[in-house]
Image (cartoon, grey):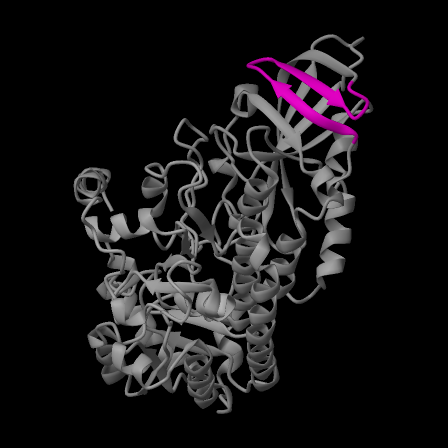
Amino acid sequence: MKKGRLGMLFLSTLLLGACASNTSSTGDTTENTATKDEALEIVTTFYPMYDFTKNIVGDEANVALLMPAGTEPHDYEPSAKDIANIQKADVFVYNNENMEMWVPSLEETFTNGDVNVIKATDGMLLLPGSEDEHDHDHGHGEEGHVHELDPHVWVSPYRAIQEVESIRDQLIAAYPDKKEAFTTNAEKYLTKLTALDESYQETLKQAKQKCFVTQHAAFGYLALDYGLTQAPIAGLSPDEEPSPARLAELKEFVDEHGVKYIYFEENASDAIARTLADEAKVELEVLNPLEGLTQEAMDNGEDYVSVMEQNLAALRKTADTANPKEETAKHEKEKTVYNGYFEDSDVKDRPLSDWSGQWQSVYPLLGDGSLDQVFDYKAKLDPSQTQEEYKEYYTIGYKTDVKEITITDDTMEFIFDDNSSEKATYRYAGKEILNYKAGNRGVRFLFEATDPDTKAFKYVQFSDHSISPTKSEHFHIYFGNDSQEALIDEVDNWPTYYRTDLSATEIAQEMLAH
């Protein structure tokens, strides 16, 4: 939503607040089992948040669904009445600002303590929107460094469990007197979700065909957690129109890789999916991203668990069908400069100012568990190593006693674990292109201290996936006192640094986005 629109709504809210109703825009979904004097009033954004919260609070709260049944959450804009209802509630539960993009602006209008805001993905790392969503050449400017992230975590039962636990823990922190009720209710629901997760694991682990084509990219977490591959027609929003070139590419993909089903959504336009299915002469099947349930479905007793069971049955139509072309559908890393594919002529000299700023080592984050989610993702994206093996590999790679580095246009100051420091002036000493066994390449940019008697490192090399002048977002660094050649030979230890103004969670998210 545009800020101007939100600003008008917030002003309207102030004017209407005194006479606004205390029910949501979908009054039929408000729970009224608790007495009015004792019950908490909770507003949730879209269906999974409603269903998760309702199962946790039981009789302890009235839970309202903000978005009307069947509404597309990606397109939703709260009305003045909706905002007034949120502001009058005890608790507001939402998924993530990458889904409910209007929430951060709304939070600015809250008075401290008036509304307990619960973010269901709090502490969870999100997948990048796609390989093409982020630009590695932009800076870390005043507006921050932002990647489009995939908010559809609830579509994987494995991560739905984490969201329910997060909502439960935040509710208990806000209302400790209700801890016993919230804990008991959540445990009953988590038992159901755990059984659902185990059913997905057991059913899909032996899938004969792992690649499935979807209407939009809502099933990335489901695919990741259960060993499948999602091939979306459109991006993160179901209304995003794929280009004719993208449709032609997908038709070719379907033809070449033996795809027999294309999955579409009942609550969104299926015209594009039907067009592709007709052209490719394959069948359509429903796969529900649970971004919203129709009122009819809810009236018939459908809920998160039942719909996810239906999704599993639909996925089995692909997973249980042997496909002799399955191996050809495996994803290959895109051959971009960032991934190490470039010509020698593309590599340009870079000044030390490309790395100017204050930087922190990521090595300490290994010890406190801040990067454990990163390794979990890596193990699922590339199962050639376990989560523990990835962590061990990066522990060796990141190891250093230099906790911070401050860089200007021509100086570097190294701050060590014991808080001692050494500083020197450096000159550019050229670049070195490295060829790796995997077929990709890297570039080291070399610097040397101008004072041969300095107590700081005499030789320093930077590597940050860029091959021409650009402000660095993070970097790997190699330093020593023997020679540049000795550093070039170092491939096992590559201390890595991010800006000091990033939190541990932000660094972990950045690492995952890259």
Q: Position of residue 158 (x, y in %)?
A: 56, 70
Q: Quadrant of residue 450?
A: top right
Q: Going by the image, does 192 lie left or right of 63? A: right
Task: Report the front residue among 314 and 63.
Answer: 63
Q: Quadrant of residue 264?
A: bottom left
Span colored in magenta: 401-419
Task: Report the front residue among 66 and 216.
Answer: 66
Residue 103 in view of the camera? yes
Q: Position of residue 317 (x, y in %)?
A: 44, 90
Task: Report the front residue among 346 and 508.
Answer: 508
Identified at 22% across, 44% down, the residue is 17
Marks counted in the figure total 0
Q: Going by the image, does 370 lie left or right of 43? A: right
Q: Position of residue 416 (x, y in %)?
A: 77, 23
Q: Position of residue 514 (x, y in %)?
A: 53, 48
Q: Quadrant of residue 314?
A: bottom left
Q: Going by the image, does 334 lie left or right of 256? A: right
Q: Is residue 455 magenta?
A: no
The relative height of residue 52 versus residue 113 in the rendered view (above or below) is below
Q: Going by the image, does 83 lie left or right of 359? A: left
Q: Main secondary structure of the magenta part?
A: strand
Residue 101 in view of the camera? no
Identified at 40% across, 55% down, the residue is 94
Q: Is residue 413 magenta?
A: yes
The relative height of residue 125 versus residue 398 in the rendered view (above or below) is below
The relative height of residue 255 versus residue 114 in the rendered view (above or below) is below
